[in-house]
Amino acid sequence: MAFRKRNIALSRAHPAVENNPSTPSAAPPPGVRPSPIDGRPTTSTGTPSLDSILAGHAGLALGTSILVEESGTTDYAGALLRFYAAEGVVQGHKVHVVGIGQVWGRELPGMSEDRKDDDGGRRERMKIAWRYEGMGRFEGARGACLTVATSQGDSTTAEEAAVFCHTFDLAKRLSLPVGTAINYVPISRPSGASASPFPSILQNIQRQLASTPSHTIHRIVIPSLLSPALYPPSSAHPTSVLQFLHALRALLRQNPGRLTAMLTLPLSLYPRTSGLVRWMEILCDGVFELSPFPHSHMQALAQSAGTTKEEERPQGMFAVHKLPVFHEKGGGGGGGVELLGEDMAFTLSRRRFVVAKFSLPPLEGDTEAQEEAVREAAAGASAMPKKADLEF
């Protein structure tokens, strides 16, 4: 009877492969970090509340686009575009602004000055859990802008430089350094009545992509798409705008690690009930709608039941029509995704754009409930209830 020794290790299928020490991965470009859901590279929109809603990825995934629709004559969507462009300028990204000249670029909001104080307090709190100090911190539903994780050997200045999302002040102006990477793409006026102005826009962006290194991040800003003040009448034809969005989507898919886009559309000129707008929404990865409150009824309608004197009152409703879906399990969860089933409202203040839950205000005649809510807010959440108020 034949026997075989059991203590002999079997030879591997690929003996030539050696266990070399793993080389450290290259650092991501400034303003880019991996998603906490699946690790895909993401960048900030410049608005923490909007980053938290984007399917739990805590940012806008590279290679995707966002369409922001707004009804009425206000320009809240324009504020989102300015935050998006200002974040790209601060991070050193290449920003392409379509249809608007340098005046729009000189009106970008400047950085807020209280950033260092927030970071100092956050670092003090992180000292309590010292073993988690080197881990990345991703923002919550209404969290502030956070920093990207750095190695243990990095200095404090390096940690402060690796900010994922900055805080901007609309009352200030961003000082553009010499050689700022802002490309103002003009809208050509074709001679023919049915000619489209969009091919020249795509060619301009493609030339910029080809002339820059592969690690350069690009941001496309398209304000007031199809507005008669910027675009010729032929651009609103489906054969023109839908082909442009098809080509833009293909350009984003060809550059999944270096290109994002944000567009705005005036719903007062192109309502969502039209088939053209629905096709435009299909060709964009994310679709949000802003419905500002009427100015005459803002005081009556915009006051939420949980609003106190220290908070800003909501200025309109925020609707999510579409989120980027990257796999069969959906876009992910966490962050502000739990708000998607609730009525949401937005608030634009001097330093931030916040999206939060919206609730109806109390009745006008119920003054006792309003006064009691104010007293509870003044007392603080740590105040203990009285014995008479406890019910068993």
Image (cartoon, rainbow, N blue to C red):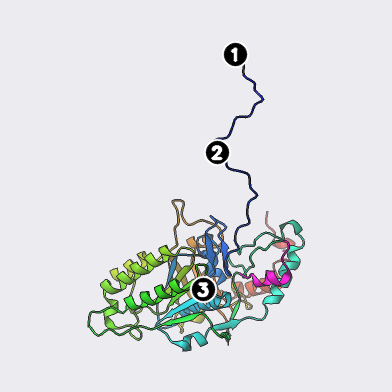
Q: Secondary structure at mark 2?
A: loop
Number of numbered callouts drawn: 3
How many angstroms separate mark 2 from mark 1 (CA)? 29 Å
Query: Residue 173 location, x and y as percent?
Result: 57, 86
Q: Where does residue 192 sit, x and y in percent of width and height?
A: 22, 83
Q: Residues within 10 Å of mark 2 (few under 14, many from 20)?
A: few
Amino acid beneath label 1: Ala
Q: Which residue is painted at 32% across and 66% down in the image?
A: 279
Q: Is residue 339 visible?
A: yes
Amino acid identity at mark 2: His
Q: Which mark is residue 2?
A: 1
Query: Would residue 388 appear left or right of 68 to someone viewing this image?
Result: right
Closer to viewer: mark 3 or mark 1: 1
Image quadrant occupied by the N terminus? top right
Task: Please identify the residue farthest to the front as the structure is shown.
Answer: 16
User: What residue does disc 2 label?
Assistant: 14
- Residue type at tag 3: Phe
Q: Earlier in the sequence, mark 2 or mark 1?
A: 1
Residues 144 and 206: in front is 206
- Taking the magenta stretch, the answer to whether it contains residue 158 is yes
Element type at mark 1: loop
Q: Give the number of the disc on residue 346.
A: 3
* Viewer-side residue, 118 vs 175: 175
Which residue range is magenta in the image? 152-163
Which of the marked residues, 2 or 3, is nearer the chain's N terminus? 2
- Judge whether residue 211 is colored magenta: no
